[in-house]
Image (cartoon, grey):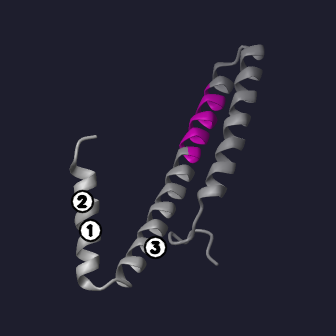
Amino acid sequence: MNAFDPTRSRGPQDEELGLRLLAGGAVVSVLAALARSRLLGLVGFVASLIGVVAILRGRLEQREEQILSAEDQIRSQLDDLDPLARARVLKDLAEAELSPE
């Protein structure tokens, strides 16, 4: 399997990497403050920022997978219905989504 395969799921790995980068960046930032080093502080900040982006990317990817899975399940169940029953279910869903609560 290619490590750069865009079709493979990376959500949990991105999130784990992000947490490590965020923690490492925080540690480096603390060390930079103690050493009064602007460069080290910048490195810590950038690492933390990259960590946050990786965490968000992982969570968004997991959300997309959940949406696609739910869509597949719903489509499968709708395909099992006859055309009139399918139309009724879709109509009821549309009305429920459009009506104010």
Whichever of labels 3 and 1 marks the residue nearer the N terminus, that label is: 3
Residue 32 in magenta?
no
**Residue 23 against residue 34 in the figure, above or below:** below
Between the C-alphas of marks 2 and 1, the distance is 6 Å
Do residues under tags 2 and 1 come within 8 Å of each other at their CB atoms?
yes
For mark 3, give the secondary structure: helix
80 on left or right of 29: left
Q: Looking at the figure, which quarter contains the C terminus?
A: top left
Image depth: mark 3 or mark 2 in front: 2
Question: Callout 2 environment at 10 Å: few (<14), some (14 to 19), or many (20+)?
Answer: few
Q: Amino acid at mark 3?
A: Gln
Disc on res. 90: 1
Measured along the vertical axis of the image, is residue 14 above or below residue 4?
Answer: above
Residue 16 coordinates in the image, percent (x, y): 69, 50
Magenta-tinted stretch: 42-55
* Amino acid type of the residue tagged 1 in the rendering: Leu
- Labelled pair 3, 2 in contact (Cβ < 8 Å): no
Name which residue lies at 41% across and 71% down: 74
Residue type at the position of mark 2: Ala
The residue tagged 2 is 94
Q: If you read the primary sequence from the N terminus, does the residue marked by circle 3 or circle 2 appear first? A: 3
In this figure, which residue is indicated by the disc labeled 3? 73
The rendered magenta stretch, by its main secondary structure, is classed as helix
In the visual, does 70 lie left or right of 28? Answer: left
